[in-house]
Image (cartoon, coloured by chain):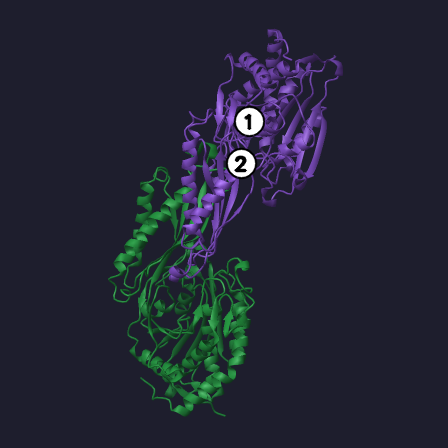
Chain colours: A purple, B green
Amino acid sequence: MMQPPLDSATTNAIRAAVADGFERQTQFLADFTRIPSLRGREHAALDFMAGALRMRGWQVDDWTVSTDQLADQPGFSDCNGEVPHIRSVVGTLEPSAPQDVGQSLILQGHLDVVPEGPHDMWHSPPFDPQIRDGWMYGRGAGDMKAGKVAALFAVDALRRAGYAPAGRVHYQSVVEEESSGLGAVATLARGYRADCAFIPEPTGLGLVRAQVGAIWFRLKVRGRPAHVAYAGAGASAITAAIHLITALQKMEADWNTQAAQHPDYRDVPHPLNFNAGQIKGGDWTSSLSAWCDVDCRMGLLPGDDVAARRAQIVETVQQAAAAHPFLRDMPPEIEWTGFMADGYSLQNADAPEAALARAHSAATGASKPQDQSWTALTDTRFYGLYHGIPSLCYGPEADSIHGFDEKVNLASVQRCTEVIALFIANWCGLRPLSG
Amino acid sequence: MMQPPLDSATTNAIRAAVADGFERQTQFLADFTRIPSLRGREHAALDFMAGALRMRGWQVDDWTVSTDQLADQPGFSDCNGEVPHIRSVVGTLEPSAPQDVGQSLILQGHLDVVPEGPHDMWHSPPFDPQIRDGWMYGRGAGDMKAGKVAALFAVDALRRAGYAPAGRVHYQSVVEEESSGLGAVATLARGYRADCAFIPEPTGLGLVRAQVGAIWFRLKVRGRPAHVAYAGAGASAITAAIHLITALQKMEADWNTQAAQHPDYRDVPHPLNFNAGQIKGGDWTSSLSAWCDVDCRMGLLPGDDVAARRAQIVETVQQAAAAHPFLRDMPPEIEWTGFMADGYSLQNADAPEAALARAHSAATGASKPQDQSWTALTDTRFYGLYHGIPSLCYGPEADSIHGFDEKVNLASVQRCTEVIALFIANWCGLRPLSG
């Protein structure tokens, strides 16, 4: 059900409306980025979004669900019990004339950000966004507050141009994208569906054709502590943890060798990254450490069976432990602390892809967005893989996401806002707002 | 100035007095062990000791010194500024008749204990001492509260037998033995001296003939964080820290090869232990870690120059960093967090050794205590190396010090109390208490 091409007057009017609102949009993005919406501390950002939606006249659904109640949803991760509740905020715009309704759309984005690390390694404070040379710096500015804000202001721009989407639009603010995807799961469990989902993660105006999956796990290594004087009598949990990390790095190399066969990743060097992202162990410098916890992430390919990959991780750890003088008798525990995520290759998305290509072309002059095979993941998998909702990931250009001096290119944000507005026009259709 | 041998009646009376008091001594040890006198939290234990001394009529010196004021003392470590003050408690017994004064004695012991680690790895709570099969279990029971209490009750036993030491005795309670020795430094800076120092660390009724030195340092590794998806673009501080640990383990092996030539350590396999005792790094499982701190300890031999060994550690870290793709451009920092300790081989101690041998023989039947070359260190170095005070380390039998289920053998504690009482008699001489 493709909409007829927009005439160039409408296209130009929409682009001009985006430009008109861009200063306010930039200010809004700065205000939003100022909120340190780290895992477990997303409430202020959710309130901010709920307020912005209400002010614009969207219907707002703001609810909290106990994580336990999501356990039967596909793609569920129990996060080792560390995330008891999920709050989400969804704004809905219903088309006013049900008889000529256009295709519906979910505009989804997460508002959780990853920790900013030591502040002295930032050139400007991570939660005090600043603009330099056309880039806005700040934790979360790129991943993915700029895209999230672009989607909201895209609808604003349509309105300023005198239009509303002719199909139902759900504007969804979710949490936990960076850890598990439980926010997306919660909205799907709530019953939200549409003909297409669109997630403006920072893709540099490219289209994510494929994305990896990931598994999070914590190695809990216990040692046999002793005074370092009698090192032979004890066993350092830290040294033992390093032994396990080394074994997992070997597994990583093996998986990447296999990955060279995957149609979406054969041209991507080393798509599957293992990361020991956090480590903590020991209580005393002169004691062999009694304990060491290592928080790990391992990627997997679209098409991989998560349970099978998980079993391989367990096997790798068990084999390494069995070959270790001390872990043999005191094997480490593994906790599953977050992602238990399938990879996802875009499928059954010809229609929304065509609508996006048309919008991208109108805003950028290029015939279509560049395809990307991501070594990270996004929430698209939930819509595409488990609910048959074609799910596009396309957004502005960011740099150093998860790093210091994360930044987003504001010109790309404006361009992305235009593309999203034009995509909505192409996908949902437009109806004139009655004056 | 050797005292004449004790007659067997006096010897027996002193041993009987120890036995008489041993139930109270055991209770006192349990009460003392119940105090979790961890680094920086030794005040309650110092109060406990000051109270016990006052109750017994000792003169008590209870003072606090700013660590800065100790900076010109030999063997000083600045502990990276983490220990601003040092409090010590010294009890003194003066001989009542100055004209026939015996040799003086410092009975020193530390009351700081090392962290107990996860409580679930203890069979009984670490600070709820329990007795099983003749052993008292608890953090610090062995290292070194049992020996410390034995020295106090040894003097009590002499009094119950009708005697007081004929020479001045300083009973010193110090902190920081486990980290730097700043407690011992503070007592020496205060002016306390004697003809001999005696430290009842848990030696299993052996005599420490030699002990290693140690250097503490913290590696502060900074990474170049990035989303794990782009692992190639960033650099994990955790992975880089593991690279440095590996280089230091190689250095450890080299130093031990050299140690095979040392007269006191040629028969000790692997006397110099490197330990990465604490590690902490990273903020997010799916981000390459921005930082990783590793707290390290490295042993050194008696006779080694601490400054030269310290320089070798720096060089090892620098060379490893220079050979690393990322650390090359962002070398780690090294902080000196505690020990900057010389090793020490007992010297000029023939007279106190003979007095100890006689006491040990009277209590155990063996001709003299077994010599030990320790791969740990004690405070004896300050007295022996910097102040010409022969300094003996001899105490009860403990097991699993710094580990879980630390314990001390109560029979050995009683034996040790006898030996200390008899040693005081041999060294200081006795004078009858006027009835």
Asked whether the viewer can see residue B89, the reply is no
Labels 1 and 2: the sequence-earlier one: 1
Say which of B395 and A249 sits in front: A249
Q: Do pointers 1 and 2 mark residues of a single chain? A: yes
Q: Residue at x 29, y 78 (%)?
A: B350
Instruction: Give amino acid for label 1.
Output: Glu
Q: In terms of secondary structure, where does tag 1 sit?
A: loop
Q: In terms of secondary structure, where does tag 2 sit?
A: helix
Q: Is residue A201 above or below residue B144?
A: above
Instruction: Give amino acid for label 2.
Output: Val
Q: Residue at x 75, y 17 (%)?
A: A96
Asked whether the viewer can see residue B161, the reply is yes
Q: Quadrant of residue B380?
A: bottom left
Q: Is residue A71 above or below residue B148?
A: above
- Label 1: chain letter: A
Say which of A390 and A307 sits in front: A307
Q: Is residue A406 above or below residue B316?
A: above
From the image, tell me which residue sits under label 2. A306
The number of discs equals 2
| Residue A311 image point, x, y percent | 51, 41
Viewer-side label of 1, 2? 2
| Residue A393 image point, x, y percent | 56, 24
Q: Is disc 1 surrounded by few (<14), some (14 to 19) or many (20+) residues within 10 Å?
A: many
- Label 2: chain letter: A
Indicate the quadrant containing the N terminus of chain B: top left, top right, bottom left or bottom right. Answer: bottom left
| Residue A58 image point, x, y percent | 71, 24
Relative placement, left or right, of B140 versus A71 is left
Q: Residue at x 45, y 59 (%)?
A: A225
From the image, tell me which residue sits under label 1. A201
Say which of A409 and A166 sits in front: A166
Could you tell me how far apart the alpha carbons at marks 1 and 2 are, in whole angstroms? 24 Å
